[in-house]
């Protein structure tokens, strides 16, 4: 008899996730199995897989692991963090409105608000090239990144995961699909990078698209939205509180230029299901 494992399908502004509860039982994931789950034809289909684990240190409620559709584990996901918070409350794993979770990037605080919104403390901004990581001799606000056909000006930073953000005149005409993969795998980013494109509407409003490392362009990228606002603030183009429109919807991002970056937006359950992970595990190969 198949050993069926429950999961939740969720999304944050169209950036969709399969979420597993590894608090109640271990979840046997391998890169090949992750790719199978994420496949939109032969699996459940998602941009990323989120795994909820027990907190293993004082004051930390849960562990939070994030896997991209290509099977690789990553440090941070803002849209996923909001879904994580809704999941643990909806599943009765906590009754708190504010929870502390451990990610590969460090600790993250999530606050559940009315109307299904979640406020996320995304942590501090890292601008030192070696810590992003990014190959550069000295720290700058805008770097010139050589591509095959042209050079682009990018602001490089990490918010738990690496981002390269460029300002464009028209977000709809930006070469996200053609150029994004080349930036993602550029040799100056030893661990890859999320390639962000930002159109400034005014000082409190931007439009953003992101070609995500290991997932391609998604309908929304929470950390990418935050990185875009940070880049705009560093270039003195934006105010402290910014409305960010992504293809899947709207986020509010706030950064005072020194402390943590704050992001607020919705998280929506789509459906609950059961999957025979162990059967799939036996059919997949590395």
Image: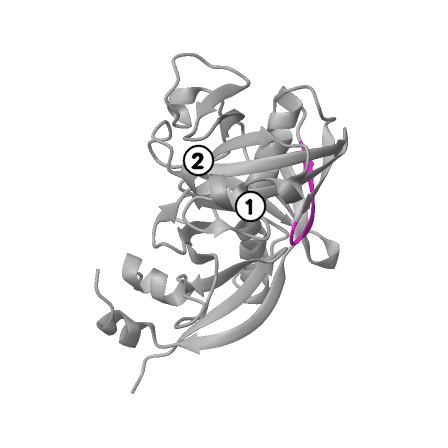
- Disc 1 is placed on an element classified as helix
Task: Say whether residue 223 is left or right of residue 52.
Answer: right
Vertical placement of residue 230 versus 91, above or below = above
Question: Mark 2: few, some, or many residues within 10 Å (few <14, many ≥20)?
Answer: many
In this view, which residue lies farthest toward the bottom? Answer: 1
Q: Is residue 115 magenta?
A: no
Q: Would residue 260 be seen by someone viewing this image from the given angle?
A: no
For image coordinates 29% across by 73% down, the residue present is: 280
User: What residue is pinned by disc 1?
Assistant: 78
Q: Nearer the viewer, residue 190 or 261?
A: 190
Q: Is residue 60 above or below residue 154?
A: below
Name the N-terminal-most of marks 2 and 1: 1
Instruction: Give the image quarter of residue 239.
Output: top right
Secondary-structure class at tag 2: helix
Q: Main secondary structure of the magenta part?
A: strand
Asked if residue 202 can be seen in this view, the reply is yes
Question: Front-most of 254 and 235?
Answer: 235
Q: Image quadrant for the N terminus?
A: bottom left
**Left or right: 172, with 4 as reference point:** right
Give the x, y percent position of residue 78. 55, 45
> Which x, y percent locates residue 138?
43, 12
Q: Quadrant of residue 23?
A: bottom left
Provide the residue span drawn in magenta: 247-254
Q: Is residue 274 above or below residue 204?
A: below
Q: Position of residue 181 (x, y in %)?
A: 43, 42
Task: Decide: few, some or many residues near mark 1? Use Cα within 10 Å; few <14, some 14-19, many ≥20.
Answer: many
Cα–Cα gap, marks 2 and 1: 21 Å
218 on left or right of 23: right
User: Label 2, on which residue?
Assistant: 183
Q: Which label sits in the foreground, 2 or 1?
A: 2
Q: Residue at x 59, y 50 (%)?
A: 220
């Amino acid at each position: 008899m198949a050993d069926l494992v429950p999961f939740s399908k969720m999304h944050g502004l169209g950036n969709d996730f399969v979420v597993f509860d590894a608090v109640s039982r271990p979840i046997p994931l391998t890169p090949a199995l992750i790719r199978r789950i994420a496949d939109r034809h032969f699996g459940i289909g998602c941009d990323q897989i989120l795994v909820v684990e027990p907190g293993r240190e004082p004051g930390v409620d849960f562990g939070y692991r994030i896997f991209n559709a290509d099977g690789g584990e990553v440090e941070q996901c803002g849209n996923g963090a909001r879904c994580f918070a809704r999941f643990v409350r909806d599943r009765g794993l906590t009754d708190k409105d504010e929870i502390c979770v451990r990610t590969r990037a460090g600790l993250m605080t999530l606050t559940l608000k009315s109307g299904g919104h979640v406020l996320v403390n995304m942590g501090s901004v890292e601008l030192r090239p070696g810590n992003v990581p990014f190959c550069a001799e000295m720290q700058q606000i805008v770097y010139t990144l050589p591509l095959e056909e042209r050079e682009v000006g990018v602001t490089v930073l990490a918010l738990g995961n690496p981002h390269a953000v460029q300002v464009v005149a028209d977000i709809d005409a930006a070469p996200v699909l053609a150029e994004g993969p080349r930036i993602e795998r550029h040799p100056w980013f030893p661990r890859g990078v999320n390639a962000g494109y930002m159109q400034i509407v005014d000082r409190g409003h931007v439009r953003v698209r992101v070609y995500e490392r290991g997932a391609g362009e998604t309908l929304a990228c929470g950390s990418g939205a935050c990185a875009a606002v940070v880049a705009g603030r560093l270039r003195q183009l934006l105010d402290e509180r910014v409305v960010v429109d992504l293809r899947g919807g709207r986020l509010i991002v706030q950064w005072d230029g020194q402390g943590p970056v704050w992001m607020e937006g919705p998280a929506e359950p789509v459906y609950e299901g059961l999957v025979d992970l162990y059967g799939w595990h036996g059919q997949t190969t590395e």
